[in-house]
Amino acid sequence: MRILVTGGAGFIGSEFVRGLLARGSDRVTVLDALTYSGNTANLAPVAGHAGYSFVAGDIRDAGTVDRVMPGHDVVVHFAAESHVDRSIDGAGPFVSTNVLGTQVLLDAVLKHGVGRFVHISTDEVYGSIDKGEWSEDQILAPSSPYSASKAASDLLALAYHRTHGMDVVVTRCSNNYGPHQYAEKLIPLFVTRLLEGKRVPLYGDGANVREWLHVEDHCRGIERVMRDGRPGGVYHIGGGRELTNRELVGMLLDACGARWDSVERVADRKGHDRRYALSIDKIRDELGYAPRIPFEEGLARTVAWYRDNRDWWQPGGGPPGATAGGTEAGSPAGTEAVIGG
Ligand code: NAD
């Protein structure tokens, strides 16, 4: 299969590409604009693979997308502005990349008759839930400009299925963690700061609940949906560990050999969702999916990766061969960029 992966130089997209090429005979083209969170070093392990090619380009650029699209059987669409706090500071790039960029891709898929469009969405499109869990037919009620732009693109993709009969599948996943995640999201931000002996910021009362799934488990779920999901289907990918931010921070302090006096309480995020929770009955029953990596094991591996790969994230480090995004990826965010997915 010839697979076009947008955003394949980012955290989750690069895991997906490395996994596909390590396992099988698929051919993969990565299309990525190498924004601050894209880093070609994430793709270094597959750079010499015969089935791999990389195009530096923007999904909003219809000309580039039109040139890259022909010959592919599937598009797996990860490319996005992905950090909630940045969307609160300015929603423009989120609407532009996440909504308009998705529309450009969908039009090119339609034009070139590409077989399938896999849209990578998020649990955040539902808003917040105090008790119980969401099923896939829950109405979307996003809270942040990030999640609203993801909800818009998610619904746009499904509309191309209904209107044009396009083979679209949508995955909605909970918070991911693992190696190669830009150090602005909770786990890599805290780990990199604690490893440097710095203080870390905790939003509000720390009682917000998130469900944490290892990125390898997420990518296995995406692959199951890509190969066997029903056209027009929406699939949750979750089943990770539910933790309050306070509980998670306690585990991160232990893992990094730090104490609670390293934690600084900061004002809560505006519009901060209290809890997300996905039912994974559908993907389990239809596609036989279940996560495999226990949280304690995945977290220990993740902390070890950041400890062993300081040149990936430390300022001025920048791994050999990294191009755009490499230097930026070496800069852990300041204390203003904090928690949540
Ligand atoms: P990331 O920020 O690490 O990677 C995003 C990638 O997209 C980067 O390589 C970036 O260069 C690229 N990109 C951004 N704008 C682009 C554009 N205009 N054109 C081409 N490339 C562009 O994000 P991530 O955490 O890997 O998330 C990937 C996808 O998964 C996103 O769609 C996100 O909404 C979704 N998701 C993430 C999580 C999570 O916990 N991280 C959970 C559920 C869903």
Image: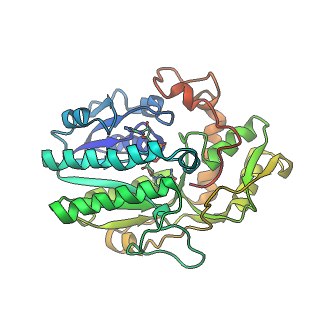
Name the residue nearer the viewer: 154 or 55: 154
Up/down of 71 relative to 237, above or below: above
**Ligand 1 quadrant?**
top left
Residue 37 position in % (x across, y down): 50, 37
Question: Does residue 187 appear to the left or right of 106 in the view shown?
Answer: right
Q: Is any part of residue 81 visible from this angle?
A: no
Count all numbered tags in the image, as a single digit: 0
Q: How is the image coloured?
A: rainbow
Residue shown at the point (60%, 68%) measured from the top left: 275
**Considering only vertical position in the picture, is 88 above or below 170?**
above
Image quarter for residue 290? bottom left
Closest to the observer, 70 or 19: 70
- Spot the residue most to the right: 261
The residue lying at 41 percent from left, 48 percent from top is 95
| Residue beneath the point at 62% across and 67% down | 274
* Front in this rendered view, residue 302 or 232: 232
Residue shown at the point (33%, 46%) measured from the top left: 100
Along the horizontal axis of the image, is 282 left or right of 323? left
Q: Position of residue 340 (x, y in %)?
A: 61, 55
If the image is split into quadrants, where does the C terminus sit?
A: bottom right
* Left or right of 72 in this view: 57: right
Looking at the image, is 177 positioned above or below residue 193?
Answer: below
Q: Position of residue 54 (x, y in %)?
A: 32, 30
Q: Is residue 220 visible?
A: yes
Query: Which residue is more in the foreground, 204 or 224?
Result: 204
Q: Is residue 248 left or right of residue 323?
A: right
